[in-house]
Image (cartoon, rainbow, N blue to C red):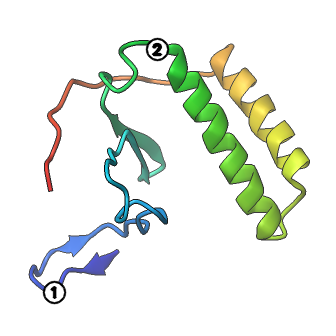
Amino acid sequence: MHTDDDDDELLPEELELPDGILDAEQAVEVLRAWVADGALHVIFDPETFRHDVGEWGRMLSDVAQHVANAVEMDGQMTQQEALSRIHDAFDQNMHGGDVSVAGRIKGRTEH
């Protein structure tokens, strides 16, 4: 956690914006994920891929590719080993994982 100079309360540490976002003509955040006190918390816009919900699967696959590439660059394991472990964990969790899901539709914040 870090302290915001304008506020005395502690704020959670956020990741930097990806390269290219600030220079893009159009950019929209579609997913944010946090682990807080051991639990996963996500927020996303379900309207993002309203035209084809399958696009969420393609996006998650792309995220897995980025994670595997970063893991290899970090020297943890090869990209293929990382993808294999990610795939196995995904399959296990999708087919029998004990995930508690709750939520509500929230609004978008304009900056």
Q: Quadrant of residue 7?
A: bottom left
Locate the N terminus and report the quarter of the image it occupies: bottom left
Q: Is residue 63 above or below residue 22?
A: above
Question: Which residue occupies 68% across, 52% down?
Answer: 67
* Depth check, front residue: 18 or 26: 26
Q: Amino acid at mark 1?
A: Asp
Query: Residue 4: image x %, image y %?
Result: 19, 80
* Depth check, front residue: 71 or 56: 56
Give the residue at mark 1.
5
Left or right of 66: which side holds 71?
right
Q: Is residue 44 above or below residue 51?
A: below
Give the residue at mark 2.
53
Question: Which residue occupies 22% across, 24% down?
Answer: 104
Crowding around mark 1 (Cα neighbors within 10 Å: few <14, some 14 to 19, many 20+) is few
- Name the element at disc 2: loop
Query: Residue 92: image x %, image y %?
Result: 73, 23
Query: Residue 68: image x %, image y %?
Result: 75, 51
* Depth check, front residue: 24 or 52: 24
Left or right of 101: which side holds 74?
right
Q: Are marks 1 and 2 in contact (CB under 8 Å)?
A: no
